[in-house]
Amino acid sequence: MTSAEARTRQRGAGMDRRRLLVALQIIVALAASVYVVWLIDWSEAVAVMAAADPRWFLLAFMLSLIAFIPAALRWVGLLRGMGVGYRLVSGYLAYLTGTFYSLAMPGVIGGDAARIWLCRRETGARLWLIAASVLTERALGVAALLVVLSIGLGLFPAASRVWVTEAAPFLAVSVLLGVAGFPWLLRRLETAALPSGYGGAGAVIRRAGTWLLQRLAPVKDLGIGPIAIALSLSLGFQLLDIAVTFAIGQALGLDLNMMVLFVAMPIVYLATVLPVSPGGLGVREAALVVVLSQFGIAAADAALLALAVFLNRVAVGCVGAVQHMAGGVRLSREMRTMRREDG
């Protein structure tokens, strides 16, 4: 077998594994979605929707669009810190487009991938550099969720506190210190020697570590200032997203309070970090039902809320679809072209 044939076979095996993973993710998403829909009391849901105040739904929709402003500011700021100039308007529209693709083509063209390719098309920057900015963005998003969770735990009444709530301030401080020290850690790792030995497994680990450090190299040059600003913008984005859920809950007449959502929503979004479904579809909604049920919200009410939040996201995705189609961009075709150009 020639080396070319071996590479072709290896690529084919990789594609087969990718298809299998996507198929499994879709199965998980469908199962979780069916679970949520099955929990809804549809006769009651019709009555609730008929009595719902549409102004709350409109507020939730507008807040969803506004939430992309701090998100776009965060991304553009990180890109500039890495030497890539990207317009704020383009970053905002890329978020809208990403929402559309994460809903319309889950597992094929994810929202983050769509944003990376759109940024690459406008700036001409290397794909791995833009991907590093998105990865940093995601890490800061997780850190912001942990900070919000810490705040939520700290707001619990003294009578209902347990050791977890008492540890909330330490969690918040640990997260902030970890975020501030991340670029420093990357600089130290860059100069450190990767461990030798351990046979073939060690070689794989060393190659993976070297590849990851190379891809995250732009992050090490970010100062504390840009990191702090990006984290603050991440907090703003998460708080607006919680406000969206609160507004939809008010429209449905649910007895929700912000203290509950400050704890519930970070847990829900952290559950979607694991790639068990395309873009967190289904898993996000099922996690919301499970978590809110722990706070005394009836499963049927929580399921209806989860469905309404998802439909609000679909509405935002439709806005992204309209503005994207108006630009006449064939993203999937451009992705293939750019991948060849970028090697």
Image (cartoon, grey):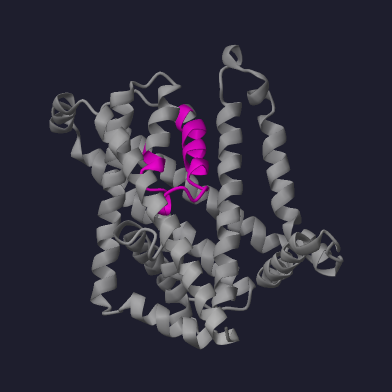
Highlighted magenta segment, given as a residue range: 260-285
Residue 304 in sight here: yes
In this rendered view, identify the residue nearer to me: 233 or 101.
Answer: 101
Residue at horizontal 82 percent and vertical 58 percent from the top: 198
Q: Quadrant of residue 184?
A: bottom right
Residue 183 point in image, percent of width and height: 74, 62
Relative to 340, is 281 above or below? above
Picture quadrant where residue 302 is located: top left
On the rendered structure, is 247 left or right of 83? left
Q: Main secondary structure of the magenta part?
A: helix
Q: Is residue 102 left or right of residue 171?
A: left
Whole-percent x, y for residue 240 in the image: 43, 46
Residue drawn at point x = 37 percent, y = 68 percent: 93
Residue 330 location, x and y as percent? 30, 78
User: Magenta stretch: residue 273 in it?
Assistant: yes
Q: Quadrant of the N terminus?
A: bottom right
Give the residue displayed 36% in from the left and 51% down from the top.
26
The residue lying at 17 percent from left, 28 percent from top is 42
Residue 41 or residue 52, whichever sits in front: 41
Q: In this orientation, does residue 254 appear?
A: no
